[in-house]
């Protein structure tokens, strides 16, 4: 295995010297940013392909725009050697609905109590009474699950029926909330079928969770929370994983508004702060640093910066990532598409790179202007 990942060429080298990253340093969190049109997602795909080729690091990709759903679809221009090597990689794409790929499901009752409450838009403080009801029936439900008495509740529609079967009006309120919000009818829930957690536990080379296949943000965020909760609950297994969160502002914004969004942000910040020692390493990709929660941003030891025209954003990057030279940050507004500054642990010294070509197809490509 090569000691470095070849990702393109050094921009100002006389002989187009190859630009390389140290794969061992992906055991630190990475921040990847660039404004719209900078080539951010395409370039990120170049790096993920190299990680697939040259490491055994499992990738878990939360993909809100369906940009990486073709990560296993190899381009015709790839060499026979690369084609044969990539073809051996176990890349699984999980998608909502009847789209091509594996079905994307999660087990509602496997979520931690606070996560189930957040999906129901119940805040432990502001909705204390309803949360307390969930707290009081938790032991009963978990006991029934352990003994098999809860088997029928894992079937579609049975949870509402279980809650309605009690004479307790507080349980009826929970059932009404499930029905009114339509949560019990989400196709996300497995209700006895395989879940995304089962796929992750099989440790494929890449698990692409197509969040963009959902029609609503609550369902998309619930799927993301199910993945991150599962990884965090099993952190003591210490299985190294790179958790790639594309368009991270959708999941980890500075000012989340709903209980679900707040808990999801809290989980990502927790992984950023404590996940490294368990082998849970984040790669957060977004258009602007100000769109990502500062407590997640500040934990990143690697930086990939593409074109960024906002002086305010560049100032913020300079203050957070002190290892990125101001003289190179200042050049970012002039970057052409596909050019990037790399700084931090995964390069020996900060460099500006012209990214290489993709080996696989990107899922979300720009729509062209129709010409006459």
Image: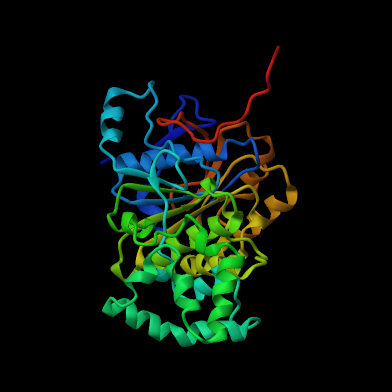
Q: Residue at x 40, y 59 (%)?
A: 190
Number of dots carrying numbers: 0
- The reply to whether residue 60 is in sight is yes
- The reply to whether residue 321 is in sight is no
Quick one: 105 or 270, which is closer to the camera?
105
Quick one: 295 or 234, which is closer to the camera?
234
Quick one: 272 or 224, which is closer to the camera?
224
Q: Residue at x 46, y 79 (%)?
A: 165
Q: Is residue 203 left or right of residue 26?
A: left
Up the image or down, 155 lies above or below 339; here it is below
Q: Residue at x 45, y 84 (%)?
A: 137
Q: Position of residue 118 (x, y in %)?
A: 56, 71
Residue 252 in which image quadrant: bottom right
Looking at the rendering, in which quadrant would you find the N terminus? top left
Q: Position of residue 58 (x, y in %)?
A: 33, 51
Residue 250 in which image quadrant: bottom right
In this view, the residue farthest toward the top is 372
Looking at the rendering, in which quadrant would you find the C terminus? top right
Q: Position of residue 205 (x, y in %)?
A: 31, 47
Q: Residue at x 48, y 58 (%)?
A: 223
In this view, the residue farthest toward the right is 311
Colouring of the image: rainbow
Up the image or down, 302 lies above or below 328; here it is below
Quick one: 25 or 93, which is closer to the camera?
93
Q: Is residue 218 left or right of residue 205?
A: right
Q: Position of residue 229 (x, y in %)?
A: 43, 67
Up the image or down, 248 lies above or below 369; here it is below
């Amino acid at each position: 295995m090569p000691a470095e990942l070849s990702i393109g060429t050094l921009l100002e080298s006389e002989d187009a010297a190859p630009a390389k990253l140290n794969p061992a340093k992906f055991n630190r969190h990475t921040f990847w940013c660039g404004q719209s049109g900078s080539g951010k997602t395409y370039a990120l795909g170049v790096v993920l392909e190299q990680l697939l080729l040259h490491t055994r690091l499992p990738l878990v990709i939360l993909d809100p725009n369906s940009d990486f759903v073709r990560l296993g679809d190899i381009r015709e221009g790839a060499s026979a050697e690369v084609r044969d090597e990539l073809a051996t990689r176990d890349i699984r794409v999980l998608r909502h609905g009847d789209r091509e790929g594996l079905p994307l499901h999660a087990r509602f009752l496997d979520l931690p109590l606070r996560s189930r409450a957040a999906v129901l838009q119940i805040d432990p403080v502001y909705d204390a009474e309803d949360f307390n009801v969930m707290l009081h029936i938790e032991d009963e439900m978990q006991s029934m699950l352990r003994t098999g008495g809860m088997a029928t509740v894992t079937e579609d529609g049975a949870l509402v029926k279980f809650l309605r079967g009690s004479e307790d009006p507080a349980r009826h309120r929970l059932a009404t909330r499930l029905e009114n919000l339509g949560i019990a009818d989400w196709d996300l829930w497995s209700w006895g079928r395989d879940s995304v957690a089962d796929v992750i536990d099989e440790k494929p080379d890449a698990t692409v969770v197509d969040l963009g296949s959902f029609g609503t943000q609550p369902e998309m965020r619930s799927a993301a929370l199910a993945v991150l909760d599962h990884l965090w609950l099993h952190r003591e297994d210490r299985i190294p994983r790179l958790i790639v969160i594309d368009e991270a502002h959708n999941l980890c914004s500075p000012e989340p508004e709903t209980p679900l969004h707040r808990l999801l942000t809290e989980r990502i910040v927790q992984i950023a702060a404590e996940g490294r020692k368990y082998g849970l390493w984040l790669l957060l990709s977004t258009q602007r640093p100000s769109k990502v929660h500062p407590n997640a941003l500040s934990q990143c030891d690697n930086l990939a910066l593409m074109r960024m025209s906002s002086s305010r954003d560049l100032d913020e990057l300079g203050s957070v990532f002190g290892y990125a030279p101001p003289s190179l940050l200042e050049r970012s507004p002039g970057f052409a598409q596909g050019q990037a500054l790399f700084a931090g642990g995964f390069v020996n010294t900060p460099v500006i790179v012209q990214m290489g070509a993709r080996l696989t197809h990107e899922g979300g490509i720009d729509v062209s202007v129709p010409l006459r």
